[in-house]
Amino acid sequence: MRWSSLLSQERLTPSQGGDPWRNEFERDYDRAVFCTPVRRLQDKAQVFPMEEHDAIRTRLTHSLEVSTVARTIARASAVWLAKEKEIECLPQGDQVAQIETIAATCGLIHDLGNPPFGHAGEEAIREWFLNNHGARIKKIRRKQQQCADDFVHFDGNAQTIRLLTRLQMFGDQQGLNLTCATLSSALKYVSPSHETIEARHDASKPGYFASEKAIVEVVGKKTGTEGVRHPITFLVEAADDIVNATVDVEDAIKKGVIKWAEFEAQLRTSKDSQVVKVLKETKKLAKGRQKNPTDETYAQAFRVAAIQVMVGAVLESFRGKYEDIMHGKYHNELLKTSVAGELRGICKTVLKQRVFPSDLILRVEMRGKIVIHDLLDMFWDGAAVCDEKTNKGTEFDGKIYKLVSSNYRHVFHKEKSGSQLPELYHRLQLVTDYLAGMTDTFASTLHKRLRNG
């Protein structure tokens, strides 16, 4: 891969307007900031669904933090690339600034496709298709394997690509019509749903749906990333990993799900130099703020110390893996394989064993599963038989169809009319699009109104 192509400023549709104050990647960032799906993240769960505590992170605050860390990592990496003469650093085309901006944008939009109730929502959607549409899925599979697997392997990352390129209505109806460089960097996984390979990290989940296959292929050709991940993708993924590993622990301590002493005890079982370094710096920072630090103070100090160590480790890892990344041969995670890998692992283990299975989270996730299944049942009645011109079902079917967002219905009608994919695929996708776009509160409130008022 070459950076001259990786930083392609082309858009799938030529963009009208513009101004002399922003380059194309800055315009991408601004489009993301002002788009509706980003605003919806303020009411989507990060770890704790339907959280009333204002200080606990939502998916929006999480994305802002990922964007910030991604910008830092990308800037430092790009400065190194400039010193190595891999990229240019000129006033008229500063590629350091371009890489930094792309990473910040991708950090902001990386979770747009997540349905309500987080990863539990993804699982609920997959389960609904398997339990209710097994025969229909088999019927689709006979025509195209990916079309079937898009539903039984539904993933928020692939839904993000669909949102960016299809569902978010911008003036030219090409989604946000982002540059090819930004779209390629946002493609976290590079395989379709029927070709995922567990042995390869970058192919373990579906990266895009059949409906966006042609777009992904064009973006790959424009950027030279056909079948492989964009280098910036690794940096954004690392930023996400860093934030997940640290601030989720901070929120769990703030919520009282786990005490600082318990988490500290886990860290002290390790003799790893990076873990020891973080513990020492955490104590120093906490004692510098309070004579007798509270659990929350220790949690905040740990987050600061851990992020600093992890960022440095990722930068070192990126430099070491750079040649493999540029040749499409690196298929792992930068933070996981870095010198901070053990620190990351301890955080992830504590979250998996102590936080995610807590009653506080599980109760809401179970309620979310019921909400998602019921809404999909109801809206499928309309999507199965209706379109913008006809209703082959009951009067109720037509009414429930009209409750679906007009934007999603418009995209459905347009895609169904000129598509080579099965019509059933588009009908199933319509209900998925609508459900995945809901916030936690909207889904819960709509379910209550439709079920019992």
Image (cartoon, rainbow, N blue to C red):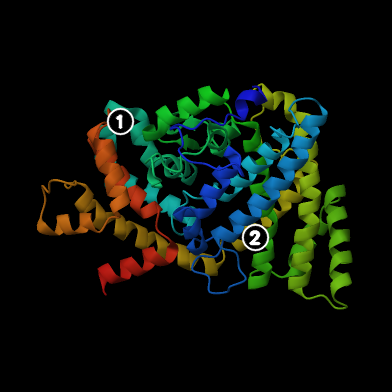
Amino acid of disc 2: Asp
Q: Quadrant of the C terminus?
A: bottom left
Which corner quadrant of the image does residue 228 belong to? Answer: top right
Q: Is residue 200 left or right of residue 209?
A: right
Mark 1 secondary-structure assignment:
helix
Amino acid of disc 1: Arg
Residue 275: percent from the left, percent from the top?
83, 52
Q: Is residue 120 left or right of residue 430?
A: right
Mark 2 secondary-structure assignment:
helix
Q: Is residue 356 left or right of residue 373?
A: right
Residue 89: percent from the left, percent from the top?
76, 32
Q: Residue furthest front?
A: 20
Residue 138: percent from the left, percent from the top?
28, 34
Q: Residues within 10 Å of mark 2 (few under 14, many from 20)?
A: many
Residue 140: percent from the left, percent from the top?
27, 33
In front of the other: 126 or 170: 170
The residue that label 2 is drawn on is 248
Where is 143 relative to 160, above or below? above
The residue that label 1 is drawn on is 141
Q: Quadrant of the N terminus?
A: top right
Where is 423 relative to 377, above or below? above
In front of the other: 276 or 1: 1
Which is more foreground, mark 1 or mark 2? 2
What's the residue at 73%, 72% (across, down)? Answer: 296
Q: Residues within 10 Å of mark 1 (few under 14, many from 20)?
A: some
In front of the other: 295 or 167: 167
What's the residue at 30%, 43% (across, down)? Answer: 411
What's the residue at 41%, 36% (across, down)? Answer: 209
Which corner quadrant of the image does residue 372 belong to? Answer: bottom left
Say whether disc 1 or disc 2 marks the residue closer to the N-terminus: 1
Q: Measure the alpha-carbon separation of dots 1 and 2.
A: 39 Å
Observer able to see residue 225: no
